[in-house]
Amino acid sequence: MDTTVYQPIPGTPPAQGTPAVRARSLTKLYGKGEATVRALDGVDVDFEKGAFTAIMGPSGSGKSTLMHLLAGLDTASSGQGFIGDTEITALGDNELTRLRRDRVGFVFQSFNLLPMFTAEQNITLPIELASGTVDKEWLATLVQTLGLGARLTHRPSELSGGQQQRVAIARALIAKPEVVFADEPTGNLDSRSGAEVLSFLRRSVRELGRTIIMVTHDPTAAAYADRVILIADGRIAGDIDDPTPESVLAGLDALRTLEGDPADALAAGPTGSTAVRA
Ligand SMILES: Nc1ncnc2c1ncn2[C@@H]1O[C@H](COP(=O)(O)OP(=O)(O)O)[C@@H](O)[C@H]1O
Ligand SMILES: [Mg+2]
């Protein structure tokens, strides 16, 4: 009988079926004593591989905190977070830095491109920083999928907001991370550029097999995802498969009713599609 015990090698892809990202009783407190804020309150959630998931909820509900903890950008007060089989809540600073570099991609509201570099240099920067070799075929695929071919030699100041965010998405995907976290990626874009960026995020999941977790306050944006997780008061409050703007709005309305506090940050905005301010 073979009794060999195989230890998982750090950095190997997780076994089939392991979710890309998990939270278990994940909790985050800010401040001390009476001023303590329970930003996350025992969150249990799985994010499947190859899926596009949106996290939605009222302003202050803990969306960014959840994302930051799961991406290793901030530390938990208690509970566990996992990227694949790796418990990120058990990692030290150096290991976390390496995990963020090698296994996670980020897209922020404010593109965060380096102004003196061209679009192409910005895209390949994570590889250069890790002294790796750029996979030219993958770069070409990303550039083509994101429609950036004619813009590669331009600097960020010569690009529209939508183009800059597409460069930032290519940069987040260039190292083929296990998961890309996006916090309000369309927050600084007009609705047309926002729709383009969301289509590209969706295509990178459907056609390029990537895994994306996106925080948004916009039901229209959330409807591009395969699934929407609703969060309220630091807890998971809902889960919507194959969301539409209508089903997402209905879910948010249900939250508002539950909370019974119309003064909460859900006051409808002038456009309806941005009814929930983050
Ligand atoms: N660095 C911080 N220090 C103190 N409180 C914070 C900090 N970051 C977030 N919070 C609080 O934690 C709660 C959740 O915040 P956040 O995750 O940013 O919400 P969201 O992204 O859903 O708007 C809020 O009450 C917020 O004020
Ligand atoms: Mg936020």
Image (cartoon, helix red, strand yellow):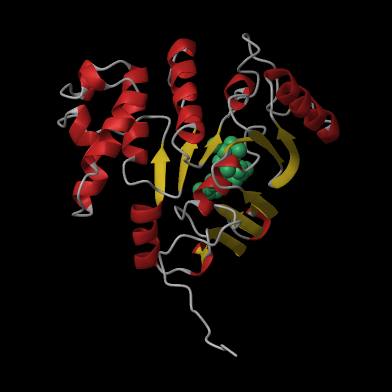
Q: Position of residue 231 (x, y in %)?
A: 69, 40
Can residue 184 be spotted in the picture?
A: no
Displayed-image quarter of ligand 2 = top right
Q: Residue at x 59, y 41 (%)?
A: 63
Residue shown at 59% from the left, 30% from the top:
225
Position of the C terminus by quadrant: top right
Q: Residue at x 65, y 35 (%)?
A: 227
Q: Nearer the viewer, residue 264 or 139?
A: 139
Q: Residue at x 41, y 35 (%)?
A: 108
Whether residue 256 sits left or right of residue 146 in the image: it is right
Q: Nearer the viewer, residue 26 or 202?
A: 202
Indicate left or right for 250 with 182 as reference.
Answer: right
Which quadrant of the structure image shows residue 224? top right
Would residue 50 appear left or right of 121 to someone viewing this image?
A: right
Q: Is residue 163 something one can see in this rendering?
A: yes
Q: Is residue 102 left or right of residue 200?
A: left
The x and y percentages for residue 36 are 64, 55
Number of numbered callouts drawn = 0
**Relative to 144, is 74 above or below?**
below
Looking at the rendered image, the quarter that the N terminus falls into is bottom right
Q: Does 230 sit above or below residue 99?
A: above
Outermost residue to the front: 1
Question: Where residue 4 appears, x then y in whole percent?
Answer: 52, 87
Residue 277 in the image: state x and y as whole percent: 60, 25
